[in-house]
Amino acid sequence: MKRVAVLGATGSIGRQALEVIEANPGLELVAASSGSQPIDGLAPLTQVGGDPTELLERAEPEVVLNAIVGFAGVTATLWALERGVELALANKESLVAAGELALAARERGGGLLLPVDSEHSAVFQCLEGREPETVHSLVLTASGGPFRGRNRSELEDVTPDNALAHPTWQMGPKITVDSATLANKGLEVIEAHFLFGLPYDRIDVVVQPTSLVHALVRFRDGAALAHLGYPDMRVPISYALTYPDRAAVDVEPLDLASGLRLEFEPVDRDAFPMLGLARRAGQLGGTYPCAFNAANEVAVAAFLEGRLPFPGIPEVVEETLGQVDGVPAGDLDELVEADAKARRIAERGMALA
Ligand code: NAD
Ligand code: MG
C-alpha cells in the first residue's frame, strides 16, 4: 500500500485523484486538505486552510499529490522535494514560480518528481529510457481554448462565462481562464523547462483542438514519439501515483477509426499574447517566472470578479514584468517576497487603469 496525501482534495484534480485512489487497492489515502471547503471524514487526517505542510508533517505520506491551485502550493512542493518524498505535481504554478529553488530541493532530497499535467506526463512517458542527447525538442499541445479562431478585437468583450466554457477539459476556474488566454500553455512551457531541462527554444507549442494528442518528443534522427488518449485527467493522475507501474484505469481504449479528428494549427500569437509573455519571463529567468505567475493570478481573479476585461489580463502581466527587477530568490522567504511584490504592482496597475 502506497500512502498518499492529496492536497486540494476538493478541486477538479483532487476529486479525480480520490476516484483513482478509491479504485486502486494499492493506494491508501492518508491525508487530505482543502483551501476552505469542509472535508471532515474524507481521510484519517484532514486540514482546511492554513499551511499544508503541517498536515504533511503529521501524515508522513509516501506520495504527495499537490493539486492546490496557484502559488499557495509552493510550500508543499518544496516540502516534498526537500525530503525526497515522491511528488505528483499538478500545481504547475509552484514549479514555475520556484523553478531553481525546487530543482535544488529535488537535488538534495533525491526523490521523484512526477508530472500530473497531461502534457508533461505525456512527455515524461515519451522520454522514458531515452538518452538526453538523442532529444531534439518537445512539442506541447494546446486545445486552443474556447476562443480559438478569434482575433484580438473579437476578444474584447468576452465574459467570464464565455471563458469558463472550455471545449475539451472540465477544470477549476483559474486554469480554465488560463486555457482561454493561453497563459496555461505559457506556464506549461516554463514547467517543461524545469522538469525536463531543455532550453526554451527547444520547447514548442502547437494547437490540437480535440486534445487527443497530449505532447510529442522529437528525436535527433527525425523520429517523433507522441502520447495519445482521450482527455481524462485520471490517466496522468494514476500514472503519477502508481509509477513505475501502470495501473489499470477504467477508461475506453482509444478508437481512432470512430471519426476522431487529429488536426494541428499554429498558435495565433497576436490574439493570445500570454504565451509569448511567459516565454519571455522564462528566458529572463530569476524571479520573472514568479512575477508572471503572480500577475496572472491577480489578473485572472480580477477578470472573474468582473473588475478587468479579458484583454486586460496580458496587459497587467506585461506591465508587471516591466516593473519587477527579477532578481533570483535565494530562499523561500525571498520568493514569497517577489511574489507579493509582483502582486502589489499588478493590483496597482489595475487601480490606475
Ligand atoms: P480547483 O480550483 O478545482 O481546486 C483547487 C483546490 O485547491 C481546491 O481543493 C481548493 O480548496 C484548494 N486550494 C485553493 N486555494 C488554496 C490555498 N490557499 N491553500 C490550500 N489549498 C487551496 O483547481 P484544479 O482545476 O483542480 O487545479 C489544481 C491544480 O492542478 C492547478 O495548479 C492546475 O493548474 C493544475 N491542473 C489542473 C488540471 C485540471 O484538469 N483541472 C489539469 C492540469 C493541471
Ligand atoms: Mg496541461
Image: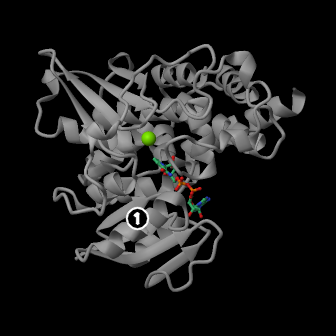
The image shows residue 252, relative to residue 99, as above or below, that is below
Q: Residues within 10 Å of mark 1 (few under 14, many from 20)?
A: many
Mark 1 vs ligand 1: CB below 8 Å = no
Residue depicted at x 56% and y 30%: 182
The residue lying at 69 percent from left, 26 percent from top is 320
Occupied quadrant, residue 261 = top left
- Is label 1 in a helix, a strand or a loop? helix
Q: Is residue 202 above or below residue 142?
A: above
Give x and y (percent) for residue 22.
Answer: 35, 75
Q: Quadrant of the C terminus?
A: top right
Q: Is 63 left, or right, of 166 in this rendering?
A: left
Q: Quadrant of residue 103?
A: top left
The single residue placed furthest to the right in the displayed view is 352
Can residue 328 be seen by looking at this rendering? no
Q: Eyeballing the image, is 163 above or below 59?
A: above
Q: Could you tell me which quadrant the N terminus lies in?
A: bottom left
Question: Could you tell me which residue is drawn at 57 percent across and 32 percent down?
Answer: 183
> Quick one: 285 or 228, which is closer to the camera?
228
Q: Is residue 243 above or below residue 197?
A: below
Q: Position of residue 341 (x, y in %)?
A: 69, 37
Across and down, in percent, residue 19 comes to: 40, 69
The residue under the point 74% across, 42% down is 160
Which quarter is ligand 2 in? top left
Q: Quadrant of residue 39?
A: bottom right
Identify which residue, 294 or 205, lies in the foreground: 205
Does residue 16 appear in this view? yes
Q: Which residue is mark 1?
A: 17
Colour scheme of the picture: one colour
